[in-house]
Image (tube, rainbow, N blue to C red):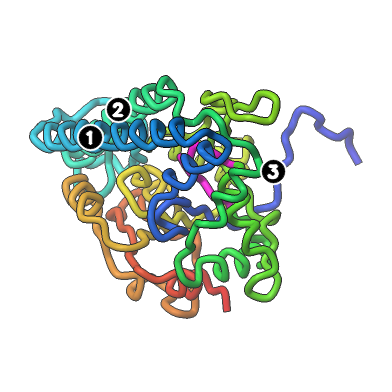
Amino acid sequence: PGARDVGRVEPKKQRRLVVVDFDDTCTLGDTISHLVSATKALQPAHVAEEKDRTYAMLFREYMEERKELIDRLFDVTVEVPRTSMPGVPEDDDGDDGDDGDIRCPKRAWLAMFLHELSCFETRRNDVVLASGILHGATIESIKGAAQNVVFRDACIETLHRASVSVGTSVVVLSANWSEEFIRAALSNHHGACGGFDAARVEVVANALEFDAGVTTGGMRVRRCQTPNDKHRLLRGLVFDGHGQHAQHPSVYVGDSVGDVPALLSANVGIVMGRNALLERVLERGGVQIRSIDEIPGGTDGVEEWGMGTTGAGRPSVVWQTSSWEDVRCALGLK
């Protein structure tokens, strides 16, 4: 045999990816208040009360400014760009139809919306960090706070069955402030559903900074803050660092506008629950929302994971459900 070509990168074996958002997708409600409670565990009463006031102020400002931004963006008419924009996959079918092509007006608006929302999220995260509200937690207080996290019915079972399925990797991709918090919440269910092993679930999120075992209020890693960050990170998982040669078929499950780029980048995008703003944004962006009951393969599972929510000649579609049991069936996890 001839000499081995050491300059060629060997493609990795293809694996299926099940990637899920955490807050409101896996859990019943947002968990940031639980994380903030971890920073109060060792504080005097007057400090804890001040943190409560700061959190209430930050939450109010965030919601007010976000609503103002979104209202303004819905009034914007976007000219069709000649080149692609970040966060929204584009087709290559050469037409100007409403089938996921960035060159169509609806998709151009969606890309603009996600860009502006991503910029807003980054600015607001800077405000949170500057407030110091994340200072004062320990690993033990974070683990204690994570015990209050309530998961949606059948979520842990679905993650468990996916994680032990041959050739399948499970990833939590989240803009949550603390990967430690997410891991602790998952670990609380270790052994459930016939042997759930939280270590089998990869967590891709942000990480708090610690000094002498206590959070400083800053971040050690700012990995996933915005909708477009999720798009970038999901693509990194799908292509595995080896370009087009290592593309892994993927399913993404999310619940909010922050998940839109990931929902559209995955082969199969599934929306958990009903979210009026998300539905409004997807409709404006030219994306169909259909019941998961209509997904090809039905209760026998998605047999062709290469079936994309986006792609040349196909309209963009995301599948909606309010049940992790439906997700489990759609993935063919008996």
Q: Please say whether residue 86 is visible from this viewpoint.
A: yes
Q: Earlier in the sequence, mark 1 or mark 3?
A: 3
Give the mark nearer the N terminus: 2 vs 3: 3
Looking at the rendering, which quadrant does residue 9 occupy? Answer: top right
How packed mark 1 is, by other alpha carbons closer than 10 Å (few <14, some 14-19, many 20 or more), is: some
Location of residue 20 in the rendering, given as x and y in whole percent from the top left corner: 49, 54
As measured in the structure, the alpha-carbon distance from the residue carrying label 1 to the one carrying label 3 is 43 Å
Q: Is residue 325 above or below residue 43?
A: below
According to the picture, the residue beneath numbered tag 2 turns out to be: 120
- Vertical relation: 98 (above or below) 243: below
Which residue ends up furthest to the top in the rendered image?
130
Q: Position of residue 96 (x, y in %)?
A: 20, 41
Which label belongs to residue 66?
A: 1
Q: Which residue is mark 3?
A: 11
Amino acid bearing label 1: Arg
Q: Nearer the viewer, residue 31 or 230?
A: 31
Name the image quarter holding the C terminus.
Answer: bottom right
Measured Cα–Cα span from mark 2 to mark 3: 38 Å
- Specify start and end residues of the magenta stretch as a single range: 171-179
Q: Amino acid at mark 3?
A: Pro
Q: Could you classify mark 3 by the number of other residues whose Cα lies within 10 Å: few (under 14), some (14-19), or many (20 or more)?
A: few
Residue 290 position by quadrant: bottom left
Percent position of residue 331, x then y: 51, 69
Q: Nearer the viewer, mark 1 or mark 3?
A: 1
